[in-house]
Image (cartoon, rainbow, N blue to C red):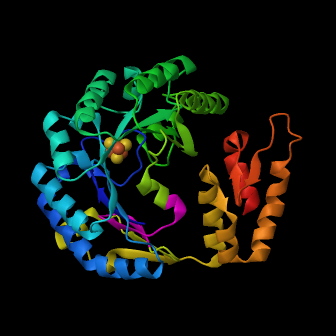
């Protein structure tokens, strides 16, 4: 599997909690951006293909337009970028996702995304309670989000929706309202994230000045349990810590990140991985990217040593329901490292805890149980 990611670095407004690399809509020079992204793809694709072949990545591929707000791309620019990525991904495309905001969804835009080749939509709804949406600076309303979903459903049979829990003012009752609304839409996939107070965001400044009160950690944990319990009842599998899907509808593109297959990130601040030991990141310099186009000097490269690779495999493996493949782990890091991993994990497999074991060994995989998911950070840290 090989992934192709486009980072579209423009948004209509900055949401209060967002620390992604984005600029205001008014700065969107779509001609320059599209030209630079297509130029970057042409320059980097041969090396990416060579490295992916070397990593035995197979020919199947995925495309993901994220950001930022790819749903702001004007039609001709969207088509040009979609064509460029489809050519790069060649014929064995498994999935082409576009991230959209509810306020950008119209009958015309949905038809455009579909006809340009997209097969899956990921929509940032976050909550179906207007006061909660307002508290994090989202511009849509619950009604607008529901209408957008209805429009998308006419074109797409694979839709993911994002939910954020632990929002200022959110209670278990209002979360339940959002969950009920989501379930009634029957999306194929739900991503549910806990609200993070990232450094240098407006939301963190509001918290620090006492103007908003964060939800208590215990309450946030109960919300997480409520989401996983309710979605499980409705037939959604929690295949990753924050991701739930109907059977067979897991995000293929995002699963590749957790399975560490190669991906090529195009656009300012986009990250790439060569499938073995090199990570690359484009510097987040929008003006240079728009003015000069992409150049090799924009790339920062990190070569991962064996300890870093082992820690990554533990971290990403335990985030997934299927867990760490112990045969693969042994091939990569040796028998001794595998035995140490199992030894360190053994205390978490004990059934002496009243709530049952936190980790388990089954079919050659080490994975977390439902209880383990709640204390995943603690377990991962212990296994490093
Ligand atoms: S729409 Fe998404 S990327 Fe843009 S500011 Fe809001 S959270 Fe950030």
Vertical position of residue 159 compared to residue 63: above or below: above
Q: Is residue 185 left or right of residue 98?
A: right
Any magenta on residue 261?
yes
Q: Quadrant of the N terminus?
A: bottom left
Q: Position of residue 346 (x, y in %)?
A: 84, 55
Which is more toward the observer, 367 or 172?
367
Relative placement, left or right, of 101 versus 237 is left
Which image quadrant: the C terminus? bottom right
Residue at image x 73%, y 50%?
378
In the depicted structure, whether residue 233 falls above or below residue 300:
above
User: Start and end of the magenta stretch?
Assistant: 257-273
Q: Position of residue 23 (x, y in %)?
A: 27, 52
Q: Is residue 140 visible?
A: no
Is residue 123 magenta-colored?
no
Q: Nearer the viewer, residue 141 or 184?
A: 184
From the top left corner, tell me how far across and down residue 167 is, in percent.
49, 30
Q: Could you say which quadrant of the image residue 140 lies in? A: top left
User: Is residue 195 shown above or below 61?
Assistant: above
The quarter holding residue 4 reads: bottom left
Residue 266, position as x, y percentages in the image: 31, 66
> Ligand 1: which quarter?
top left
Instruction: Name the residue rendered at 60%, 65% in the picture.
Output: 312
Which residue is located at x 37 percent, y 21 percent? 130
Q: Nearer the viewer, residue 8 or 237?
A: 237
């Amino acid at each position: 599997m090989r992934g192709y990611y486009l980072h579209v670095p423009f948004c209509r407004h900055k949401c209060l909690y967002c620390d992604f690399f984005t600029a205001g809509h008014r700065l969107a020079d779509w001609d320059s951006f599209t030209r630079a992204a297509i130029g970057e793809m042409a320059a980097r694709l041969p090396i990416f293909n060579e490295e992916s072949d070397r990593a035995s990545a197979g020919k199947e591929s995925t495309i993901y337009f994220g950001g930022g707000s790819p749903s702001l791309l004007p039609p001709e620019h969207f088509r040009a970028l979609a064509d460029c990525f489809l050519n790069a991904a060649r014929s064995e495309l498994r999935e082409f996702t576009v991230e959209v905001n509810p306020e950008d969804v119209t009958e015309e835009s949905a038809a455009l995304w579909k006809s340009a080749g997209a097969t899956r939509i990921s929509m940032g709804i976050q909550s179906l309670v207007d006061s909660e949406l307002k508290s994090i600076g989202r511009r849509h309303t619950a009604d607008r989000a529901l209408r957008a979903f209805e429009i998308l459903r006419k074109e797409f049979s694979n839709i993911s929706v994002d939910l954020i829990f632990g929002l200022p003012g959110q209670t278990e009752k209002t979360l339940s309202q959002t969950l009920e609304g989501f379930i009634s839409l029957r999306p194929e996939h739900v991503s549910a994230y806990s609200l993070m107070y990232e450094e240098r965001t407006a939301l963190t400044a509001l918290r620090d000045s006492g103007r908003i009160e964060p939800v208590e950690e215990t309450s946030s944990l109960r919300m997480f349990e409520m989401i996983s319990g309710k979605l499980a009842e409705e037939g959604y599998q929690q295949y990753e810590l924050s991701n739930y899907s109907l059977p067979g509808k897991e995000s293929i593109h995002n699963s590749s990140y957790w399975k560490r297959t190669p991906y090529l990130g195009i656009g300012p601040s986009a990250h790439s991985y060569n499938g073995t030991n090199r990570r690359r990141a484009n510097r987040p310099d929008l003006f240079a990217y728009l003015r000069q186009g992409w150049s090799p000097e924009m790339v920062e490269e990190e070569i991962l040593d064996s300890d870093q690779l082992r820690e990554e495999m533990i971290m990403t493996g335990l985030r997934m329901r299927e867990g760490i493949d112990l045969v693969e782990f042994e091939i990569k890091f040796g028998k001794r490292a595998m035995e140490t991993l199992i030894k360190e994990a053994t205390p978490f497999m004990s059934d002496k805890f009243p709530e049952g074991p936190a980790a388990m060994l089954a079919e050659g995989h080490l994975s977390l149980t439902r209880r383990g998911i709640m204390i995943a950070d603690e377990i991962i840290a212990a296994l490093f």
